[in-house]
């Protein structure tokens, strides 16, 4: 092999080594940028979450005060949202396990079922069906 060919191959090996070192350096820089960006993202997320939480608390506190004041004014007897009541041995025992039992309270009034809105007096309801 001639000298110029040998020099050319040595030069190619040197360039390949330098390119490899360059890409190793670039990958290290990219890794460090990702680590820094992760830390910054966590800090920003924590800061934003804290600020939003504080903002919502500041916004909700006056509204809750007005709500509590209105509740005192209206009274505890009126409930604007229906809620469920399960039958028990003490109250509406005939309705336990009945498919027709509704058991929702509307404005303080319990609707037991469509056939017997106020419930049945004893434990043997004639319309009872298992669900």
Image: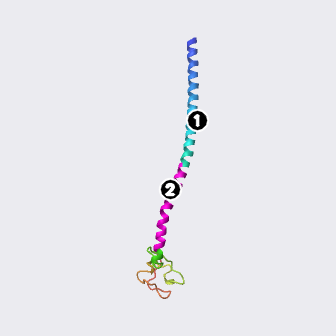
The residue singled out by tag 1 in the image is: 28
Q: Measuring 56% from the left and 49% from the top, which residue is drawn there?
A: 43
When the figure is inspected, residue 66 is found, relative to residue 94, above or below; the finding is above
- Residue 50 visible within the image: yes
Give yes or no for residue 123 being in the magenta stretch. Answer: no
- State the CA–CA distance, disc 1 to disc 2: 36 Å
Q: Would you call the spot at circle 2 few (<14 residues within 10 Å), some (14-19), or many (20 or more)?
A: few
Q: Magenta segment, principal secondary structure?
A: helix
Magenta region: which residues?
44-70
The percent coordinates of residue 74 (x first, y second) are 45, 77
Give yes or no for residue 69 being in the magenta stretch. Answer: yes
The percent coordinates of residue 10 (x first, y second) are 58, 18
Spot the residue most to the top.
Answer: 2
Q: Indicate the quadrant where residue 11 lies.
A: top right
When the figure is inspected, residue 41 is found, relative to residue 117, above or below; the finding is above
Spot the residue most to the left.
Answer: 114
The residue singled out by tag 2 in the image is: 52
Q: Quadrant of the N terminus?
A: top right
């Amino acid at each position: 092999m001639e000298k110029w060919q040998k020099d050319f191959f040595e030069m190619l090996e040197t360039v390949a080594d330098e390119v490899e070192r360059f890409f190793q350096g670039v990958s290290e820089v990219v890794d460090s940028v990702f680590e820094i960006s992760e830390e910054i993202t966590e800090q920003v997320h924590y800061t934003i979450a804290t600020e939003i939480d504080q903002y919502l608390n500041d916004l909700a506190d006056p509204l809750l005060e007005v709500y509590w004041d209105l509740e005192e004014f209206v009274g505890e007897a009126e409930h604007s949202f229906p809620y469920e009541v399960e039958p028990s041995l003490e109250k509406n025992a005939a309705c336990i396990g009945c498919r027709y039992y509704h058991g929702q309270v509307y404005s303080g009034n319990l609707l037991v079922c469509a056939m017997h809105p106020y419930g049945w007096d004893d434990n043997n309801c004639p319309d009872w069906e298992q669900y």
